[in-house]
Amino acid sequence: METEESSIGVQTIKLFGESVGITSIPEDAARHVAENLKFQLKRIIQDSAKFMRNAKRARLSPRDVDSALRARRIEPLYGFTSTDYLPWRFASGGGRELHFNEDREIDLQKFLENTAIKLPPPVKIRAHWLVIDGVQPNIPENPAPARKPPHDLSAKKLPEDLGKEDKGKDKKNEKKPGDKGQTQALEQKPLMRHELSIEQMKYYQEITQAAVGRNEEIRKEALNSLAEDTGIHAMLPRFTNFISEGIKCNINENNLALIIYLMRMVKALLDNPTLSLDMYLHEIIPVVISCVVSRQLCQRIGENHWALRQYAARVLAQISKNFTTTTSMLQTRIVQSLQKPLDRRDAALAQIYGSIVGLSELGSDVTKKIIIPRLPKISERIENLQNDLQSDPIHSDGLEHILDQVRKRICPEMPSMHQPDGVLEVDTLITEFGPYLGEKMYKRLLGAIEMR
Amino acid sequence: MNMEELPKPELDSPEIKDEVPQAVQDVEEIGLEPPPAEEFSRKEPKTAKEKSEIASIMKLLGDHGLTFALGALERETGINKDEIKDLTVETDVRQVLGQYESKTDKDSYKEAFIALQRFVDQSLDSTRAELSQLLYPVFAHTYIKLLVNNYESEARNFYNEFAKGFGEDSPYIEDIRRLATVTNKKQLAQNDVITTFKVRHFIIRMTRDSLLSLKRHINDRNIQVLIDILEDHLFIDQFDGLPRTREQIDAVSGGLLGEAKRDANKSKIQLGLLREPEVAEIEEDDLMEDEPKKKKKARAPTLRKTKNDGNAPNPTRVPLLGLQEHLLTAGDKADWLSYYKDLEHRVKLTGDQKLSAVFYSVLNADPDCLPASITISDDSTVLCAGFEDGCIRVNAIGGDNLREMKSLPQLEMLDKDRLELDNILQVSETPTRKLLGHTGAVYGVSISPRKDFLASGGEDGTVRLWSLFVYQCIIVHRGHLWPVWDVTFSPYGNYFCSVGMDRSVRVWVTDKENPIRMMAGHYSDVTVCKFHPNGNYIATGGEDRCIRLWDLLDGKCVRQLTGHRSSISVLSWSTACGKYLATGDIGGHVRFWDLSKSTKSDEILLARFSVDEQKGTVKLPVQHQHITSLTFSRCGSLLTAGTIKGEIISWDVARVLVDSENEEVSTTATGFAKNYRFHQPYRTKRSPICFLQYSRRNVLLAAGPFSR
């Protein structure tokens, strides 16, 4: 009838109570309140959706909730006017898990000094030709022409490629596709323009500055422009160069924030339907792979390089999906680079994590063929690392992340998880995952089942 | 001491009486005195049945030795203890109280539903589809009954066990999901949809034979639960003839309370178009005829409606000022003339002729305050947008500036005899005006055909009429209790109609404060309304997934169309002939109805379209398919829909009509017409299509906010 996510827990009610000074709410009372609260919330949300639909919007806004409350003759909650998504943070500690909305402090002094308030530009109505005689004219007001067909083709061919990928691996035959890629590039080279106009240079400068600058709003605009605008093809080699040099440099410097910004640029370029990164993959792929499996990406322990690795892994999977053809063998080559840390004896936990994430993003076939056979080896490696550095916080943190990923991504692919009886056997897990990992996974899965 | 001041005698046990404070006890002693006679007569039970009920309760009290309570009851009812000895207490006290409890035990509900399922499964192939209509309403009412009787966990189990059986593509999936949000008795009363469901009958149509077999089955087995639900909550409209197929039933099911009754669509309606006024040359003598509208001019064949349609209503049936030629001003005549001129230049959008479209973007709107409604005048010169902060912007889009009334000194200089509308107007200096007045979002705007008035309605529940000469609010029509969702002007002016969250449809005239018609019948919010091109009827659609056609003359509901599976968001009449209606819902489905042909609801539907067609396996999320605008081309051959994600899709309905004549509209497996797309979808960059209309020359005009 309802999923875990759509219910409000008794704990939550107790927490709400604590926040207003009621410390001892009986279990029954809390459950009663929780149930009623859930119902009332659903009612308000259903009503709010009415207001959203009649305003012809696809996104619910705080205004709709206010309207819904007003229609029920309830005083609306003033002061919630955010037009953006609220960034929810997650924290856990003391056995409790919390999702909260980070409320940043505003420096009043600065706020008051900033007197130059810009008036918003006046509302205007402008007409443009959406369609002329059945064709959408290619003007900035109209969206880019229909998506490239290769996307679909590569998606359809994927299973076939996977079949061939094994052959390629067996024969270690990589050179041919590379050669072909080069000839293709040679054929198209004369089409490229090498000189940029002043406007283009300015655009390049603005975008690159915004993309790595401090202001998140401006960065979003810049990335949006990269992802949607037409006609930036001429600047593409500069952008890819900027990105690859930037990432190389910042991996050296362990500057996590900048690497993330640059990675987002890659994603934006990749999303732009009018651009084709075909010719620049040789610059992009190595740095993306570095972001996935690099030994170190940040300076301090607490920084969340795990998220970057995941993000980069997803970008990599997208590249592989879009550009793998029967001739380029792209996926095979990416798989080979990613699996290296799994085979090496001196790999760090972060690297193992990266390659597990990266490989599993590439699809269930890759997971089955590459990761699962190597699990016992990985288990051994982690155990060794763990024994060496038991007390080191980096490692316990890393272990947590790896276990999480293994549970999320690999467990669904394991044959033992599809047993009809669904009973977990520690022995089967140990044979599949290796002794160390097997035991940990057993505990984790049991925990998950109990939670349910 | 006055008896009225006394507290009611305690009906509790004597032990509690001991704890009653002294003061109260004193009062009670006084209370023992026989109250005045009139008190008796008021409280005395009237019928023998009531008496016997009370008697049985008194008997119960006596049996348990609760003498104080017995005494109190005696005093209150005036029935003596001895009196009841004469009365034969035939009814057991349990039975008396039992009518407030459920008569059936909790497992029998589930058994009854399973029995019904089995009966449907085992029925003949020919009647199975018909009988399976019963499953959803019986399921829903069983769930509600379980909750009413406080069997919460049984209700949850019942839902979990059987809800899945209806599948994701059930016509009632929205309501099935909605049922799940209610989990106890208290919540039942607070859910509007379920309240409607509880008090109204769910309508099912089936053949006499199927009904007989059903009745025989449940009577044989004496499944009381089913008998109760059938009698109390379902209305079975039986008919003779062949049972309908699953496809036929599927096409009409989906309404909140099932489909329309057979006789709901019986009355005759006149959908023909009226003759347009003749204004080409000013011929004074023609005005002398007794029926000024019925002038005729023989000319070369033209698209102009030079005579009344055979099926048109009498032009005086509903007084239409906009058609009365003696009332036309020079400006009106010029408007008609330009309309006729445009007719001659109209592009015929069939075959190889390609579509052209202009998009009006509302730029720089605050993302928190986008336009909620946009409309463009029929002659494509004025665009009005109602914003979410309550402001309305009027913009001239034809290149000229807006018209306005001359200033006072200028007016004073005018000759008093020549104060005609055309003389007191001038072109203003600005192309845009802002109208302030609404205190909440403006969900509906509509420009009168003469471009003299603008009607608007919004979240504040008011309908406002603005003058487009002085750009001020002329009147605030209060009446709607909750937000107004749509407002629309009659094609001949003077009347306008508003619908809203209070489920009513109200028709107003420009010179009266109160509505001249108020129609109720929808079971949920009414979200959209449109006048028929001949001004005699109004079509409305609502969240009860039902479309109704109302007669403006007597306010009666003359048609009721079901089949949509999610809330209806848009309506459009074919202005070329007035026979066809198209409706779109928030789930991306469009239905194309022919209202002239038949009175049988399943024959009215010509075709179903889906915006999702031809997309293959990639399914858009439902909230992105919401159809926000819908219009027929002026020639009636195209039906164009706009979605919330900025897609414009057209279907070649002329071809659908030809195919339906030959009865071979090609459909997909799910019943949607396929291969009638006129062009591939056109997309905007980031604007939802809030408004669509073909200009008089058949250029598509679309409008929406450019949102970041």
Image (tube, rainbow, N blue to C red):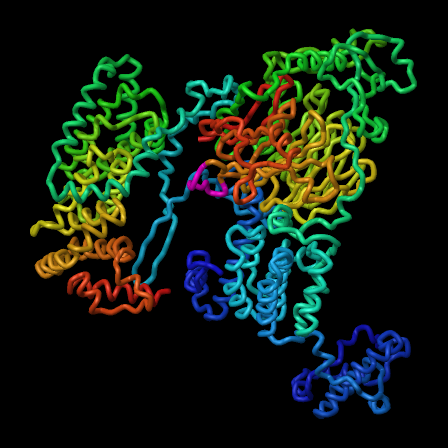
* Left or right, B219 with reference to B400: right
Find residue B708 and report its horizontal and vertical position in percent.
44, 31
Asked if residue B101 lies in the magenta stretch, the reply is: no
* Left or right, B626 with reference to B474: left
Q: Residue at x 58, y 44 (%)?
A: A50
Q: Nearer the viewer, residue B90 or A185?
A: A185
Quadrant assignment, res A145: top left
Quadrant assignment, res B312: top right
Find residue B110 and report its horizontal and vertical position in percent.
57, 70
Seen in the picture, residue A425 relative to A106 is either above or below; the reply is below
Q: Nearer the viewer, residue B13 or A264?
A: A264
Name the quarter where the C terminus of chain A is drawn: bottom left
Asked if residue B619 lies in the magenta stretch, the reply is: yes
Dominant secondary structure of the residues highlighted in magenta in the image: loop
In this figure, what is the number of numbered marks?
Answer: 0
Q: Nearer the viewer, residue A10 or B10?
A: A10
Quadrant assignment, res B481: top right
Which portion, as a residue range, is magenta? B615-623
Q: Residue at x 61, y 37 (%)?
A: B607
Find residue A149 and report its horizontal and vertical position in percent.
35, 30
Is residue B356 visible in this depiction of the protein?
no
Seen in the picture, residue A47 relative to B109 is either above or below; the reply is above
Is residue B230 visible in this depiction of the protein?
yes
Q: Residue at x 80, y 14 (%)?
A: B278
Find residue B276 and report its horizontal and vertical position in percent.
77, 19
